[in-house]
Image (cartoon, helix red, strand yellow):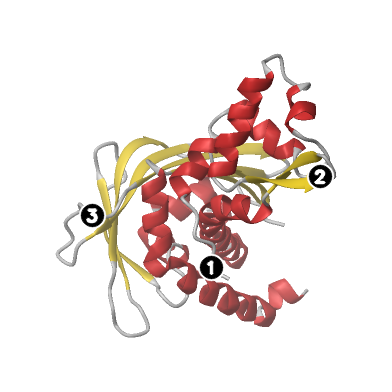
Amino acid sequence: MQIALDHDRIFGALGDATRRDIVRRAIDGTEGVAELAAHYPMSFAAVQKHVAILERAGLVSKHRNGRQKLVRTNIAGLRVARRLLDQYEELWRERVERMHQLISDSPKEADR
Amino acid sequence: MTVIAIRKDPHSRTMTLEAEFEASPERVWQLWADPRQLERWWGPPTYPATVDAHDLRPGGRVEYHMTGPEGDQPRGFWDVEEVEPPNRIVFQDGFANEDGTPSTELPMTTARVAIQAIGGGKTRMSIESEFPTVEAMEQLAAMGMEEGLRQAVGQIDSILAEDPVGAR
């Protein structure tokens, strides 16, 4: 399945330390906005706003559990953000492997 | 294991890789400073690189082309900003047009290379790649780089499997 997400929103949403922390905490999906708000020295409304930004970016979603709405991290959304950096990781990993081969193939040159 | 650490920070749009080599900093430096060695690792096996110009000085430029399986020849360049042999290189890593002029459409990434002796005859090399914008990251990702890389990974695996040193 192709995930069509707004990359600008994702990176914008992750550009705030509180929001990154919310994304980490919400991986288990056991807390609602009120419980999340208790972790931060800021108002419920402020935390609610952060959650709304994360929701719009597709990074978290809310799930009903009885009378409570739990905030849960959308792992697929996070993956999209990392995918772009993953490609570069792969590029450089392979380059470094080739460097390693070059050095191992020519021990004499190292002493020159 | 050559690559010892990878850090990816979506917020600052950077990827940092650290590697260790059983060699001196001078030897690792040669991988960058000698164009014949550079072309043996820069491109994937399906797109080997040929270095056309190699002026590794602040303000200098390194130019290369790669040759694909269909004979296609993508070109690229580095605009060199800082050079401190054998410890440090900073350059802008860009794509070039067919005539070798820098592409105005494709973004450049900033590469910072640090090479340090860590004792025991070993050397640590770190490479930090920084993307200017999210758009730039997307654009580079969309260039089909991924496919080419996946092929390259498969080829390297088979090369390593045949390699007598690796097999020991």
**Cα gap from disc 1 to disc 2, whole angstroms:** 25 Å
Q: Which mark is residue A28?
A: 2
Which quadrant of the rendered structure holds the N terminus of chain B? bottom right
Asked whether the residues under the numbered discs 3 and 1 touch, taking CB atoms below 8 Å apart as contact, a structural biologist would say no
SS category of the residue bearing label 3: loop
- The reply to the same-chain question for discs 3 and 1 is no
SS category of the residue bearing label 1: loop
Which of labels 3 and 2 is toward the front?
Answer: 2
Tell me the chain of label 1: A
Q: Which mark is residue A82?
A: none
Decide which of tag 1 and tag 2 comes sooner along the chain: 1
SS category of the residue bearing label 2: loop
**Residue at point 20% right, 52% down?**
B104
Q: From the top left corner, tell me how far across and down residue B89 is, in percent.
A: 42, 40
**Residue at point 80% right, 36% down?**
A31
Q: From the top left corner, tell me how far across and down residue B58 is, in percent.
A: 29, 36
The disc labelled 2 sits on which kind of residue? Asp
Q: Which mark is residue A2?
A: 1
Q: Examine the rendered structure and indicate whether residue B140 appears above or below residue A64.
A: below
Quarter of the image for residue B100 reads: bottom left
The disc labelled 1 sits on which kind of residue? Gln
Q: Between residues B119 and A55, which one lies in front from this camera angle?
A: A55
**Residue at point 41% right, 54% down?**
B138
Q: Examine the rendered structure and indicate whether residue B91 appears above or below residue B64.
A: above
Is residue B13 visible in the rendered image? The answer is no
Q: From the top left corner, tell me how far across and down residue B33 is, in percent.
A: 40, 50
Q: Which mark is residue B105?
A: 3
- The reply to the same-chain question for discs 1 and 2 is yes
Q: Examine the rendered structure and indicate whether residue B155 appears above or below residue A30.
A: below
Tell me the chain of label 2: A
Q: From the top left corner, tell me how far across and down residue B167 is, in percent.
A: 75, 76
Q: Between residues A21 and B38, which one lies in front from this camera angle?
A: A21
